[in-house]
Image (tube, rainbow, N blue to C red):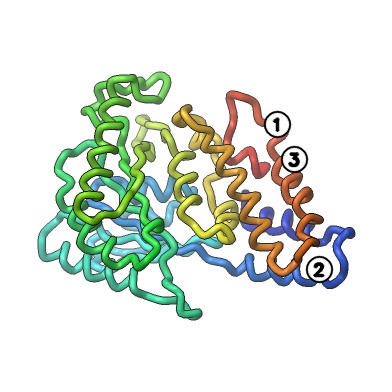
Amino acid sequence: MNHQKLFDTLEQVVSDPSLSEYDKLVAQRNLARLRETKVNILVTGATGAGKSSTINALFNTEVAKVGVGADPETMHIKKFELNNIILWDSPGLGDSPEKDRIHAKGIMNKLLEKDHDGNLLIDLVLVILEGATRDLGTSYELITRVIIPNLGEDKKRLLIAINQADVAMKGRGWDYEKNEPRPELVKFLDAKVESTRKRIKEATGVDVEPIYYSAGYKEGNEEQKPYNLSKLLSFLLRSTKKEKRVVFGSDINNKREVWEKDDELEDYQENIKQSFIESALEAIGRGLGKAIEAIVSPVTNAINTATSFISSSFRTVAGWFGF
C-alpha cells in the first residue's frame, strides 16, 4: 500500500457521519498526528549478513543498495528516510577491531539519542546475524556489550534475526523448488535460534526470541526468493509501540512474491493484519471515549475489504491493503 492510499483510507474512516463534529475533529487531529509519525529502525550486523537485502525486501526500496547514496566504506551510520519509516544503517562489523570500536561508538550514540520530545529516537534495533557462519563472536559482543546495556528499560526494542537460512548448511537441506527448508535444515536452524537465545540470556539476563529467514537475492539470471519475511515483519510490529504500527503500511514491499512463502506453524500474516487494525484504532481513537466504537467497524472493514480476494495460495501482506 502506498503512503497516500493508506491515509486516504483512514481519512474516510474518521469522516464517518455517525461521529459527532467534536469526535470527528478529535479523530482528524489524531490522524494528522499519525501522518507525521515516524518509526526509527537501527539495522546492524556483520559485513555480509545481508542488511541491505533485508531492507530492500521488506520495504521495496533500492536506496539501501551498497554504494548508493554513500560510500560503502563510510564509518558513519547512514540514514534512509522513507514515508513513515526511517532506517539507520550501521556499517558492517568484523572488518577490523579498530573499525568495530568506531562503529560500536556510533551505535551507542544513536541508541542514546533523543527526539524533540525527549524520548529515545530509536524505536527498534534489528540485529542481523549471518546464518551461514558459526563465527558470530563480533555480533555477540555488539549485542551483549553495546546494544543491550544502552537500550534502557525497554529491551523489547531488540530483535535478533538470522538471515540466509537457505545456505545455513552450505545449501544442504534447502528445497529450492518449494523455497523452504527440509526437516533436517529446520532442525539445524531451530538449534541455531536456541543457541543464540541461550548465549544472550546467559551473558545479559535478557530474553530474546531470535527468528530465521532469508531475504533473498537476485544476481543476473540467478534468483532466490525470500522466505519467512512475514514472520520478520510480524516480529518487527510486535516490538513497535502499538500506536505506531499502522504506519508500516505506507512503506512495506508491495510485491506479492516477497510474502508468498513463510513458516506455516503460525499465521504471521493474520497477526500483521490484526496489528494494523489495533494500531489504527489506538492512534486515531485516542480521546474519543465511547465514540471509539463508531470507528471500530469502519477500520476493520476498510482493511478486511482489501483482503476479500485473497486465496489460500496468495495470503499476502500486499493483498490486505489492496496493492
Q: Nearer the viewer, residue 307 or 188?
A: 188
Cβ–Cβ below 8 Å for labels 3 and 2?
no
Please say if 58 is above or below 240. Answer: above
Left or right: residue 284 versus residue 54 is: right
Q: Disc 3 to disc 2, how far (Cα)?
A: 25 Å
Tag 3 residue: 305
Residue 109 % position (x, y): 29, 73
Q: Nearer the viewer, mark 2 or mark 1?
A: 2
Q: Secondary structure at mark 2?
A: helix
Mark before the other along the chain sequence, 3 or 2? 2
Residue 262 % position (x, y): 46, 31
Residue 260 % position (x, y): 51, 31
Q: Disc 2 to disc 1, how far (Cα)?
A: 33 Å
**Crowd tier of the residue under label 2, counting other residues whose Cα lies within 10 Å: few below 14, some 14–19, many 20 or above:** many
Tag 1 residue: 309
**Quarter of the image where one finds residue 30:** bottom right
Tag 2 residue: 23
Please identify the quadrant where the C terminus is shown: top right
> Is residue 270 something that shows in the picture?
yes
**Crowd tier of the residue under label 3, counting other residues whose Cα lies within 10 Å: few below 14, some 14–19, many 20 or above:** few
Please say if 34 is above or below 44. Answer: below
Residue 278 % position (x, y): 63, 52
Amino acid tagged 2: Asp
